[in-house]
Amino acid sequence: MTPIEIIVLILISFSVIKILTIPNIWMKYVIRPLYSKPKILFLVELILAGIVLFFLLQSLTIVQILAVVAFGALLTGMTFAWYGKETISWAEKLLKKGIWKKAWLPILIWLALIVWGALVLFGVI
């Protein structure tokens, strides 16, 4: 198996487990424990994102990767669409607190990826 196939196998495995698990059980044994330690979760996800990006770049361009990210964002948006009121309330709460305080690194990573993608897309690099 290639690294990308292993990544997909992990995604499929977690997705099947999540879909087949009763939501309360998933919340109690997966979500709450993970999100109760946000700094550790953030660091683990940052490292995993870097590893996944490294392997994706072995066979895809940043433009292709960003196109797949757009697809994933649309699927995520479809889920959030059914929870419009809750999403707006949550987003407004985050904006009042100042999103840059905690999310500055992911925002900078997004900006770097977007600039990189634009430079490649328009043939600058």
Image: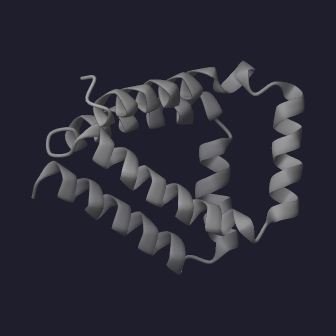
Q: Position of residue 45 (x, y in %)?
A: 46, 37
Q: How is the image coloured?
A: one colour
Which residue does the image show at 45% across and 32% down from the upper left?
Answer: 114
Relative to the observer, which residue lies in front, 28 or 57?
57
- Image spot of residue 94 (x, y percent): 82, 36
Left or right placement of residue 90 versus residue 121 in this view: right
Instruction: Quadrant for residue 80, please give it.
Output: bottom right
Q: Nearer the viewer, residue 63 or 47?
A: 63
Name the quarter where the N terminus is drawn.
bottom left
Q: Residue furthest left?
A: 1
- Left or right for 70, reference 87: left
The spot of residue 39 in percent (x, y) is 60, 27
Q: Quadrant of residue 104?
A: top right
Q: How many marks?
A: 0
* Residue beneath the point at 43% across and 50% down: 69
Q: Residue at x 63, y 68 (%)?
A: 78
Viewer-proximal residue among 52 and 117 = 117
Q: Is residue 120 above or below residue 5?
A: above
Q: Is residue 105 above or below residue 64?
A: above
| Residue under the image location 55 percent in, 28 percent down | 106
Q: Quadrant of the C terminus?
A: top left
Q: Is residue 108 left or right of residue 95?
A: left
Task: Determine the image quadrant of residue 60.
Answer: top left
